[in-house]
């Protein structure tokens, strides 16, 4: 079974820099993605902004602390808070990451890499299923950028991700910037990664900027999408057709117009790829 | 081959072992043996990317949550203090919102930072401002509702603070640092003087103000669940009965105008819950 995720167009992250625009109604966009944890609070401005955003367009919830790959038990207070937020916001969908971030009750607040082993696969599938049962809905899981791989991994990341989503019956949030960053850092073929995923499971795409360090790329979300990432996005659209796409810009966040221009560029790239596909089939 | 739990425990211990350029000294050898080195990046270099990010990210969170302390200490001293805190109090909550929950107590027990003995109190104020910023919303008592209450009903009225109000008793008047255009210069002028502050939210903005003895006594009565008559009675310890009643009514009006009081006041009931004026610590339940 594929994931049943609606097509929302091209959105941006709901970040504090642009909260005033959301409140005064000038932040017009196809849809917003909100970081779940930022709204697991009792009240005040963030929740007011979230409700205003929700009143104007679809909102999706994107978590960073579900810690799907952790060997700690799933956090019950976290799951209750997420369920409460889901009930309050009625998001178009909910997503989190294919990673772990805590062990022994200690949270790293980072998206840490898993070894791609049978043990990890069984574990993550079981956790995703539990989360979906608790939320009463399918979730999307996102590939993360990584800076190391484990020698005892038994399969490449894309095979692991594909096996997780088939085993857990969930969807994929494909971050093409993360694919590119990891491909450079680990020396694999980014296109092979994108081609290796089941297209009917891909419910959302992330686009973001990264930083070049001397010996590696760092996933910083602090700039425009890089040319090779646009190329990878072209490939993803050619393979999948229309997929809801989001510009992630979390640091050195620009003016609203610049942010929207990046989302519009994604829309144009998508249109160009769809036109190409249409012409080829005609 | 190490089980997944072992890999994760060694991984996180390695990241959190030591901040800064010394991070690689704390890397677990068994973990390093599992990490593939490739190209220009060896296995320790790769783990080090995560270690550097671990400390940088968490120090950034604390810097955002304690902005005046960060300014007064400067980047380097603040990072050193934040790392010492994180070593003692690793995060135990899925949300970074709660990362600084022990920072004030840590500073109080850390021994005074040279020349800055008021730092724990400033941390209490900054943490309290966060607690007020995202406290639960409430329906506010309006001035017209207050004025519509017949005088005969006032003695038995019990007023309640909304969730977005805290009262802090501090040994240093650190609210002056918050207001100062140059907190670093103002810090050199700090002298120990007890200050009772109320911290509240008006709209989305957070404010704090020092309260005088009369307001503090009245707030104590309010938080104890006492009706208006008892509030007046408490003020009669230092004011004449007529002054006490006038002052109490003026305070209630000011609290309503500042958005401190909740909905329609309810009549006193036997066995009602009592609040504690100084119980706030901003921790997540």
Image: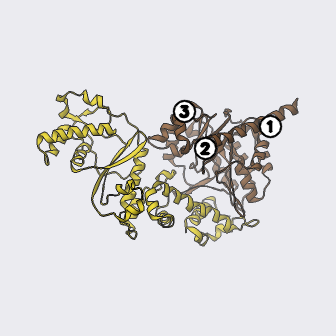
Chain colours: A brown, B yellow
- The residue pinned by badge 2 equals A255
Would you say the residues marked 3 and 1 are in contact, meaning their CB atoms lie under 8 Å apart?
Answer: no
- Is residue B210 depicted above or below B46 in this figure? above
- Is residue A104 depicted above or below A44 in this figure? below
State which quarter of the image contains the C terminus of chain A: top right
Mark 1, chain letter?
A
Tell me whether marks 3 and 2 sit on the same chain: yes
How many numbered markers are drawn?
3
Q: Is mark 2 on a helix, strand or loop?
A: loop
- The residue pinned by badge 1 equals A273
The mark nearer the N terminus, 3 or 1, is 3
Which residue is rendered at x = 25% and y = 29% of the image? B147
The mark nearer the N terminus, 1 or 2, is 2
Tell whether A215 sits left or right of A275.
left
Residue A25: give its label. Answer: 3
- Dot 1 crowding, Cα within 10 Å, few <14, some 14–19, many 20+: many
Would you say the residues marked 1 and 2 are in contact, meaning their CB atoms lie under 8 Å apart?
Answer: no
Tell whether A279 sits left or right of B27.
right
Tell whether B20 sits left or right of A164.
left
């Amino acid at each position: 079974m594929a994931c049943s995720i609606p097509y929302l167009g091209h959105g941006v992250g709901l970040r504090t820099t642009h909260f005033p625009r959301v409140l005064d109604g000038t932040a017009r966009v196809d849809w917003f993605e909100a970081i779940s944890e930022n709204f697991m609070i009792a009240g005040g401005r963030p929740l007011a902004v979230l409700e205003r955003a929700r009143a104007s367009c679809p909102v999706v919830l994107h978590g960073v602390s579900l810690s799907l790959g952790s060997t700690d038990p799933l956090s019950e207070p976290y799951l209750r808070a997420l369920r409460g937020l889901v009930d309050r916001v009625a998001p178009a969908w909910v997503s989190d990451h294919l990673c772990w971030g805590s062990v022994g009750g200690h949270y790293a607040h980072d998206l840490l890499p898993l070894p791609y082993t049978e043990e990890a696969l069984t574990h993550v599938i079981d956790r995703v299923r539990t989360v979906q049962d608790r939320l009463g809905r399918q979730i999307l899981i996102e590939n993360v950028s990584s800076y190391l791989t484990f020698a005892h991994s038994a399969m490449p990341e894309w095979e692991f991700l594909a096996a997780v989503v088939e085993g857990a019956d969930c969807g994929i949030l494909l971050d093409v910037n993360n694919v590119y960053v990891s491909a450079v850092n680990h020396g694999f073929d980014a296109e092979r990664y994108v081609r290796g995923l089941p297209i009917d499971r891909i419910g959302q795409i992330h686009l973001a900027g990264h930083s070049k360090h001397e010996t590696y790329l760092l996933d910083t979300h602090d700039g425009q999408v890089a040319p090779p990432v646009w190329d990878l996005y072209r490939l993803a659209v050619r393979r999948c057709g229309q997929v809801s796409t989001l510009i992630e810009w979390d640091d050195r966040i620009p003016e609203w117009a610049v942010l929207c221009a990046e989302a519009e560029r994604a829309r144009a790239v998508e249109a160009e790829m769809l036109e190409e596909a249409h012409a080829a089939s005609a | 081959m190490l089980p997944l739990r072992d890999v994760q425990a060694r991984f996180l211990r390695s990241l959190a072992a030591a901040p800064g350029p010394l991070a690689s000294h704390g890397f677990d050898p068994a973990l390093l043996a599992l990490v593939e080195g490739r190209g220009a990046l060896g296995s320790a270099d790769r783990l080090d990317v995560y270690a550097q990010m671990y400390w940088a990210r968490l120090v950034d969170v604390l810097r955002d949550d304690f902005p005046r302390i960060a300014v007064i200490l400067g980047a380097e001293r603040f990072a050193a203090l934040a790392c010492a805190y994180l070593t003692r109090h690793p995060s135990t909550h899925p949300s970074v919102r709660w990362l600084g929950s022990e920072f004030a107590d840590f500073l109080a027990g850390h021994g005074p930072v040279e020349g800055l003995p008021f730092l724990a109190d400033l941390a209490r104020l900054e943490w309290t401002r966060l607690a007020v910023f995202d406290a639960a919303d409430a329906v506010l008592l309006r001035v017209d509702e207050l004025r519509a209450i017949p005088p005969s009903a006032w003695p038995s009225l019990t007023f309640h603070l909304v969730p977005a109000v805290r009262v802090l008793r501090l040994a240093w008047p650190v609210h002056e640092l918050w207001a100062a255009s140059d907190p670093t210069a103002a810090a050199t002028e700090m002298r120990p003087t007890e200050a009772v502050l109320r911290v509240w939210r008006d709209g989305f903005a957070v404010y704090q103000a020092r309260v005088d003895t009369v307001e503090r006594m009245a707030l104590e009565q309010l938080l104890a669940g006492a009706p208006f008559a008892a509030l007046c009675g408490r003020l009669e310890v230092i004011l004449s009965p007529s002054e006490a009643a006038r002052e109490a009514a003026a305070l209630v009006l000011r609290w309503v105008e500042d958005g401190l009081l909740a909905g329609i006041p309810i009549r006193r009931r036997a066995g009602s819950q009592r609040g504690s004026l100084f119980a706030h610590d901003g921790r997540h339940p």
